[in-house]
Amino acid sequence: MELITPYGGGLCERYVDEATARDLKEAARDMPSWDLTLRQQCDAELLLNGGFSPLAGFMGPADYDGVLENMRLADGTLWPMPITLDVTEAFAAQVEEGSRIALRDAEGMLIAVMDVEHRWTPDRTREAEQVFGTTDTAHPGVNELLHRAGPVYLGGTLHGLEAPVHHDFRNYRYSPRELREYFQKLGWNRVVAFQTRNPMHRAQVELTRRAVRQTEANLLIHPVVGVTAPGDVDHYARVRCYEHVLRQAPEQTTQLSLLPLAMRMAGPREALWHAIIRRNYGCTHLIVGRDHASPDAGPDEQAFYGPYEAQELIQRHAEEIGIEMVPFQAMTYVQDRADFVPADEVREGEHTLSLPSSEFRRRLREGLEIPEWFSYPEVVQELRRSFPPRDRQGFTVFFTGLSGSGKSTMANALRVKLMELGGRAVTLLDGDIVRKELSSELGFSREHRDINVQRIGYVASEITKNGGCAICAPIAPYTDMRRRVRERIERVGGFIEVHVATPLETCEARDRKGLYAKARAGLIKEFTGIDDPYQEPQNPELRLDTREMTPDEAAHRILLKLEAMGFIRNP
């Protein structure tokens, strides 16, 4: 029996031959160059290696509109996710339809040349509504689309020159063609894929075992290692955990392969997309569980998608996509049987145990015991290595507020108290000092203020990653940039946002630097609080007003918060 054919009938691989590659490299010197974001690089890799077959490049408006409206390309092929190249207005102005551009990775390596066949400005709010079913920026995919994606889209065919370089876990990095050849060599013509962005514990292992028995297929553990959701465990730690799990499986029936996908967290649409991608990789079945590809609930605790919406959508299109779904409910540990079973198979009167993911993270964070029924000791040990208890992690205290609100004074008082406590290196990144030392060339436009805060966030993340304490005190007036800084830092340690909520009238009355007077006189343009907005944080860890407390009292409040969160301990 032959392997399942790729979606659309054949792998649409876009790499050119050696002679063409030499010619394109030479020609690319005179082309406008676009440095791909990490998401775009993931998309480009899967377009070039056939993972996104039948697509041959980034979508134009006809395919894009069809996907948004009815999940179909212009030729009628079912495809649920828009694959677009978003760029800045400044870059788009250099590019004409009918020209070519060079696509490069973050280090400047030429990955592909793109024929620019389309250039247009999309309605991204419409895209959010159609693809994600919401415009709520608490959804990470919506936030990325509305606040971070470029305003202009370019569409066109790709010509691949070099595959993106991955220095990590190279023995698990298979292209669709390589994985298909591997399956053929082993005689695997029935393969069930397990999609995951989390470490695997006993429940997930039991789920995959049941799926293998049910489908009489071999198992592909196919985790996403491109872009996942904010707060997810980094893929380095996850892959080491998967390696431990692999030892629990028969060697000839299970394979691990890493998928360089940029997830959108689009729930049902994304699940359908995952199924199509797995078919291109040679899989005949896909395990789809509860809340597949769904983000965490928003601040109102309302889920963005129903728990089994993804299963329902795939089931409706199963015949057309040609890959079978293996649906599962949440797995529950039944103590009476000492085993995990699907929730709908628990008998009346049986005693069940559960460990919610939030409780698992708390126990990991605080160094508490993780029950053996929940996970494997080797996996827990691996996660403890990567995520030590909070009192051994680095953290960032990020002050934000108007000029003159008291941020710098408060931050300096906190710095002294933390140095008194000892145990961590403490670094103060004051807004004025950073502007002088790191950002002296920047002005005060929105773009430049964002760059300044981004630099502060980068330095703070490096300090945090290495176990230190970073204290930041910029104005940081914009919600999205503060969110970016939080996401960057929370990947490596703790983040405590302190809104110094001293009102504008008080800050203006203080005006020790004379800046408000100059702004009122029109001598300083785009001054925060006067002719440029300050977007107040909605859910900071602390909100303090310097009218109501001294700097010492404020620093003490922050220390108590750090202690309550587990980042410092009393001797």
Image (tube, rainbow, N blue to C red):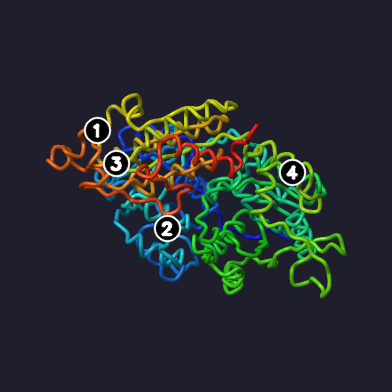
Viewer-nearest of discs 2 and 1: 1
Among the 4 quarters of the image, the one containing residue 330: bottom right
Where disc 3 sits, the SS reads helix
SS for callout 2: loop
User: Which residue: 55% across, 52% down?
Assistant: 51
How far apart marks 2 and 1 lie (CA) works out to: 37 Å
Instruction: Determine which residue is flagged by label 4.
Output: 379
Q: Amino acid at mark 1?
A: Arg
- Name the amino acid type tagged 2: Thr
Q: Quadrant of residue 28?
A: top left
Mark 4 vs 2, N-terminal side = 2
Q: Amino acid at mark 4?
A: Val
Image side of residue 255 versus residue 419, left or right: right
From mark 4 to mark 2, how far is it between C-alphas? 34 Å
Disc assigned to residue 512: 1
Q: Nearer the viewer, residue 14 or 255?
A: 255
Q: How many marks?
A: 4
Q: Nearer the viewer, mark 4 or mark 1?
A: 1
Q: Which residue is mark 2?
A: 137
Residue, x 56% and y 46% (percent of image)? 260
| Residue density around tag 1, few if under 14, some if 14–19, many if 20 or more, within 10 Å | few
Tag 1's secondary structure? Answer: loop
Q: Which of the marked residues, 4 or 1, is nearer the chain's N terminus?
A: 4
